[in-house]
Structures are given as structure tokens and as C-alpha cells.
Image (cartoon, rainbow, N blue to C red):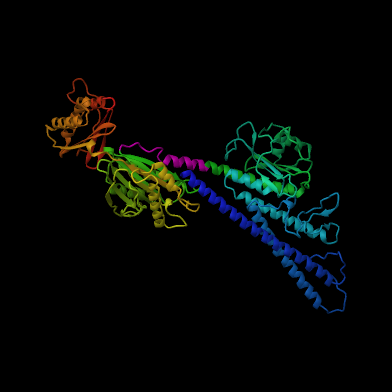
Amino acid sequence: MRTENRLGRAQKQAEDLRLQLARAEEERDRAQQVADLAARQISQLEEELRGLRPGTEPGFHVPSGAEVAVPGPAGTTTDDDALDQVDAALQKARDVLDREHEAVREAAEDVGWWDGENAEHQGGVVPGQVVRDEPTTRDDAPGLFETTPNNPPTSAATPGAGAELVVRGASDFMRFVGAATRRISRGIDLDEIVLGLCRASVPTFSDAILVYLRDPLPVGDERPVAPFVLRLRRADRLRLDEVEGEERTLVPDSDPLAAELCAVRSGGALAEVLRGVRPVFGDSAAARAALLELLGPEYVLPSPRRAILAPLRGRRRVIGTAVFLRRPERSGFGPNDLLGANQLATQTALGIDKAVLYGREASIADELQRRMLPASLPQLTGARLVSRYLPAAETARVGGDWYDAIPLPGHRVALVVGDVMGHSMASAAIMGQLRMAAQTLAGLDLPADEVLRRLDQQAQALGHDRLATCTYVVYDPVSHRITIANAGHPPPILLHLGGRAEVLRVPSGTPIGVGGVEFEAVELDAPPSSTLLLYTDGLVESRLRDVWTGIEQLRERLATTAQLTGRDQPPPLEALCDHVLDMLGPGDRDDDIALLAARFDGIAPNNVAYWFLEPEDAAPERARRLARRALVRWELEEISDSVELLISEVVTNAVRYAERPVTLRLLKTDVLRCEVGDDSPQLPRRRWARDTDESGRGLAVVEALSSRWGAVPTYGGKAVWFEVDLASP
């Protein structure tokens, strides 16, 4: 069922993505049509201008804004004013066209689109714009400037045309470099930055690119390890389908002939090029030797001026290199292309440095988060626990959400979920301090409201702005009851066996850290096979919904999930948590999420025996007699002698210091547990008795005959307990 739900979500997302891509493609085509129309109108207006100006001949191009001497009587300026207005209108039209072209171009680059017919051009693709800034010699048209297919080529020797073509080509190239650097700088991790370089370069700047990075990459001020090894990180190339007329497609795969690893030899050709830092053409002897060393001896190098080797230098050292390649049928690289490659390599190297540092900080943050949260949940008698934690996003991995489960005397357990305000290392540190404080207070077996009150004092001691919300729950499997105290946290949800999910009515309370407030605890039933869900507000609150809407959706989600397993069978805890997290949409991850689910199995009443004993000399003998009856009822006569001796020793110590009645409780689960409670706060400690001592051997006997034993403080005194394994008496 879980796989089908995820498959359905993936199919829906894919369909939405296809619709968005189709809509964006329509908008791009519409913008291209507007640009074509504007280019044709400009051409028509220029022809009309040449016809209106006296002294112009067909084929003579007058640059916009140029002054032309018009013969005629002095003082006739009406026509000149009109022509100047036309010139101004033409210039405004060109400016609008350039802005339209830049917007279309950046949008196309952002979504990875490109027109295959114009992939060979270095500049823009809007009809009517020149796309190179220097003459390109061809066999059929020597000395011509390249233009787009819808515009006839213009001779470089045409009077007045060359200067405008060079200026427009340089401007177009600068727009490409600006868009490419913006795309590279948007990346935050290593793969995003390298992908940005590849997508920005292919096919606009080159037909293929290979990016090699140092392995391993040095971080910050770390000294790089020897030897100097480069590993192929990514390679993209433009593949032209064999079917004539098909568009070119961008293929993110490696050239099979390019080497995956390259050990840079000290003093070799590649080391010299990398030491020089600046990009070089692949036509010189040193550059070709460096390319063969990098790509491998079997790699077929392209013809001259169709390869650029650009070292990637970070803030302190060379961390890799990029190789830009063009096919033979495409024009070679020019001097401006070398400058553009240098700009792309510099931006990429600085971004990689940033990404490596960010990766180290993220790993530290992840380790801090793991250390702050429990490594595993305790195995309890009468309850089962499952937890989940999700960070808010890649950019905010460390948060203040936490959860915990703390075993208490008598098979009870304290369940804690809290949320420190903020997403930072400071929030995580405060969360860790509050979690440790909660564990310490729970170990004192304080009432739930008292635990929150003391947590509030601890938060105030950390600072005036240290606020947090928290829910503290104590479950008793013997009485099948839960005690809840809340401090401004979303209320828990209890899922009953029949599938009914209810939001528990608990006092909302005030966040801890405010100070000067009282907390209230409520006691509720926890039926067997019921499930309690504790969570933080990141699960139910986002920019798209308020917290109470999210709580209602969560309640409905739990009820729907419970119906899948029937009314007599509770849903598995692991699957339940997964279904709960599946309710999160793309816009619902504004905050980190902590989730703790507890299944209450309880302990059957017939497996519990409980008595009160007066603190008198006859109490140990009475305790032995009561315990013997219980063991007979449970058919555990074989361990009766050892258990009676242990109970006698523990009860004797309790009666010696107690002023109020002593409690004796036996619990039969997979082990036999005995608990003796009294009102004395002093915990017993084992002593090493000498041969002449008349006392001090009771705890030694308990340690020798029991499987485990211990003593814990309680709110009214202490409790001493021991356990005996039933399998091996």
C-alpha cells in the first residue's frame, strides 16, 4: 500500500511537471514570436529611414543616431526633426528587443532549453541580432559576420556596420557570461555547482564539457593529501541524433574514452598548466600534452581552437580543471571565449570551495543532531515505541526539536517531545541542555507538572530569550493511565483500537522559559492496544495551513490508517509513522519534525500483586507469606525459596528506616520483578562487610541471588527493586 501511494504521488508530480514545462514552452515560443515581429519591424523602419534621408543609396546602412548632411535650403528643419524622432523610436525599440531577448534567454537557460539550430552561436538567438564579435571565415562567405537564420549576413567591410556588430556581439556575450555565473552561483552543494557549470556551458558555449576535481577535496585550510589525483566528477555532451532534422539533445554522461582518474605528475605538462591557473587553448604543444595526460592516451583530441583547458583554482589552491570541447563542424574558440572560460572556471572554483565548507558544516550539524537525540529507544514492558525525526531543509539541518523516552520505576515510562524556537547551532545546544535536564528530573520521579516547572527555571537560567514548548507524559502499564503536562505544545492524539482518533483535551500551558507561571497535569485512561502520538508543530503547521487545520488533518489521517487493519487489530507502529509523514506536501517542510508513537500494551491485572506493610518487626515474615501465595498462583514454586529470601532482606531494610507503611509489589512478565517502597529518601549502598560485622550483608545477598537490582528515588522517598529471570531460577 505504501509503495502504491508513493507511485501515485510520483505519477501526479510527473504529470504536473509536464504541464508546467508545456506551459513554459508555449510562453517561450510566444516571446520568440514577439521578438521576431519586433526584429522585422525594425528592419522595415530602417529601410523607410534610408528612403527618407536624402543622399543615401541602396545598400548603405546608416547607424542609429548618426548625423547625415541633407542638402536643401537653410532653415528647413521639419523633416530632420521627424527623422530624429524616428531614430529615437528605433533606438527604444532596439532596447526593448534586447531586454525581451535577455529575459527569454535567461528563462530558457534556467529550464535547460535551447534551440538546436542556433547552438553553434556564442551569443543570443533573437532574429536580427549579431551573435559574434569578430569575423568568422568560411569557405562560401569569407570575412562575414554570423547572424541568425532569419537575417541575411552583413559584410564586415560595409561602411559603418562593423562597429555596431562588434558592440552588439560583445554585449550579447557578456549577457551569456552573466547568466552562466548566476546559474553557477545558485548552487549550494558540490553537485549543484558542477551541474550549473555543465548546463550553462553546453550547448551555448561548447558541445561537451568534462569536469575533474581533486580527490579528496581539501577543506578550508587543510593541506591536500599526496599524491595529486583528479577524478572525473561530471561530463555532459551534446548528441546529434542520427535522424536528419532531429533536434540536439543534452546527454549527462561521460565520454567512454576519457579517463576516470588522473594522477598529476610533478613537473609534468598538466601540472604546469594547472600551476599557471589561466585557461589555455588546446592547440599548443604543452596544452595538448596536458590534455593527453588528463584524458588518457586513447582520447582523440579535437582540432585546434576547439578545446580549452581551464584550471579551477579556489581561494588557496587548484582544486580541479574543466575541459570545454567543440565539434569540428562548429567554429573554433576565440579570445573572448578564453576570457569567458576563465570567468566560468573562477566562479565554479569559488563555489566548490563554498560547497565543501558548507558540506563540512552540515556534517558537523548532522553529527550534533544525532548526538542530541537518543540513539535508540528503550525496550519496555507494557509499551512499544517508534520515533521519527526530519530536518526542515538542507539549509537548516539543525533544529530545536527533540524527543525522549525515560524508563521509570514500576515499568513506567516518561515520554517527552519538545521544540526549542529557532534553527541554529544555538537552538540545538539549548535543546540538548533541556533534554538532559528533563532526563535528570524524570529520574527523580517528580510529578509531571513539577518537571515542567523546573524545566522552566532551567530555561530562564540559560537566558531570557530561551523559549521552548514541551509535552511530558508518564504512562503506567499497571493502572493503564497516563499523566500529561503541557507547556504550549500541540496536544497529543490518542488512537483507540476501534479506529477512533481523538485530540486529547489537555491544558495548553505556557512555553517554558517565560517564568512565573504554573503548569497543570491531567490524568487520562490509556486502554490496551491504544496508540499515543506526540509530535512537534512542524508536522501540522506550514505556510499553507494553520496549526489547528493541520491537527485535524493528522487526526483524520490516523483514523484512516487504522481502518486499513480492521477494528480488532491496531496498525503497525512503523507503518503508522510512515503514513503520517506521507501527509506532508512539497510546501509543508517549513520546520523540522519530531514524532514519537507509543503503543500501550499494559500489564494484565492478574500478573500484579500489591500490598501495604506496617513498619513493624513482623513485616518481613508477612511479606514472605504473601509472596509465597502469589508465586503459587503463578505456578512459580521452583523459585519461591530464593525470592522469599530476597524479599525478606529488602523489607527488613525498609522497615528499619520507614515511618509510614511500606509498599510491596510483584509483577510477572518475562521476569519476576519485586519493588519495595518506603518514605526514607536515603538510597541504600552496598558495603563490604568484614567477618566480625553483624550487619551489612543484606545487599550482598540480593546482588548474588537476583539477576538485576537497583534503587531509585521517588517523589515520596525511594524504591528498591530486584528482578529474577523466570527461565533460569
590 or 368: nearer the eye? 590
100 or 702: nearer the eye? 100
Which stretch is magenta? 361-381
Magenta-drawn stretch contains 375: yes
Residue drawn at (50%, 46%), measured in percent from left and top?
6
Where residue 156 appears, as percent x and y from the top left, is: 84, 56
Q: Is residue 202 left or right of residue 614?
A: right
Where residue 670 appears, as percent x and y from the top left, is: 29, 32
Residue drawn at (66%, 49%), measured in percent from left and top?
200
Residue drawn at (83%, 64%), measured in percent from left and top?
61
In the rendered image, which quarter is residue 688 located in?
top left
Q: Is residue 166 left or right of residue 210?
A: right
In the rendered image, which quarter is residue 310 located in?
top right
Magenta-drawn stretch contains 346: no
Where residue 565 appears, as percent x and y from the top left, is: 38, 44
Where residue 121 appears, as percent x and y from the top left, is: 75, 52
